[in-house]
Image: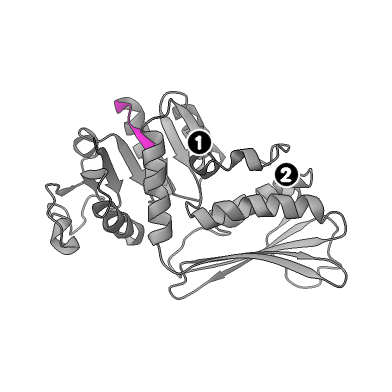
Amino acid sequence: MSIRLCIAGCTGRMGRALLEALVAAPDLTLSGALEQPGSPYLGRNPGDWLGSPLSVVITDDIRAALEPSQVLIDFTRPSGTLKHVQYCLESRRALVIGTTGFDEAGRRQIELASQSIPIVLAPNMSMGVNLSLVLLDLASRVLQPGFDIEISEAHHRHKVDAPSGTALRMGEVVAAARGQRLSEVAVYGREGLMGERAQDTIGFATVRGGDVVGDHTVAFMGWGERLEITHKASNRTTFALGALRAARFLATQPPGLYDMQDVLGLKALLRPGPPTV
């Protein structure tokens, strides 16, 4: 029996990638397509541009979109996602969240909702990125002390948050492996006479421009050598496939807050560390 999915922001960059991946998956069914009020796509069938017969029309009524669905996949913006969290909570629907840029209150709202419904919250659903978190954990434990760590990321000009959620998650993993809290050691910008680099800090550099899907590099810089762990995404299909995998995972899970390490079975490879938020 196929899993019935609703896609929020279905005509955006990620929404279209999700639709294309979904219609190619025989075990998944599009049961709801959601867009914001005023969208010129309201009332249209996504099958018109996908070249696939679908019986769903795009709506701005989240209750109507969720009613026949089991899982909502949301890659929109924090304000919209948090509204969707409440609707999923009321209707007891599972939720995959790829949105980034939540503040502490937003994350807390999601955590509270996960006590009643299953939620996957992940800043990046690429299998390669999530494997890189395991590698970063290992490298951080082996290469301390004496190695400086810098995290750089590049995204398209339309991305609204910085650093990216993926870069921050990488920083959290690195900090935890070194027995630190990211909030206490992160340096997000440098300008003017900064003085020498403070020991044990984690630096971030952000680039925005063009149509870059997502590049992330963590550099471990010591005396006489440098190790770099890099992931580059060439299109959004990798994120879409990861989100669909997360939806399959949630269809059989009890309430709880999960991430892609849970979905991919990688959590056992990440050693426990102190909290980083």
Q: Earlier in the sequence, mark 2 or mark 1?
A: 2
Which residue extends farthest bottom?
Answer: 210
- Residue at 51% in and 50% down: 123
Q: Residues within 10 Å of mark 2 (few under 14, many from 20)?
A: many
Magenta stretch: residue 92 in it?
Answer: yes
> Where residue 146 sits in the image (x, y, percent)?
87, 59
Q: Position of residue 92 (x, y in %)?
A: 33, 26
Residue assigned mark 2: 176
* Amino acid on which the number 2 mark rests in the picture: Ala
The residue lying toward the viewer, choosing from 19 and 83, is 19
Residue at image mark 1: 258
Q: Nearer the viewer, residue 255 or 99?
A: 255
Above/below status of 145 relative to 274:
below
Tell me if 218 is positioned left or right of 256 in this view: right
On the picture, is 126 further left or further right than 69? right
Check if residue 120 falls in the magenta segment.
no
Image coordinates of residue 34 in percent, x first then y, are 24, 47
What is the number of callouts on the image? Answer: 2
Q: Which residues are magenta?
A: 91-95
Figure quadrant of residue 143: bottom right
Quick check: 82 above or below 92? below
Residue 31: give x, y in percent of width and height.
20, 42
* Label 1 element class: strand
Residue name at image x 32 percent, y 40 percent:
72
Residue at 72% x, 63% y: name it.
150
Q: Camera-side residue: 83 or 22? A: 22
> Amino acid under label 1?
Tyr
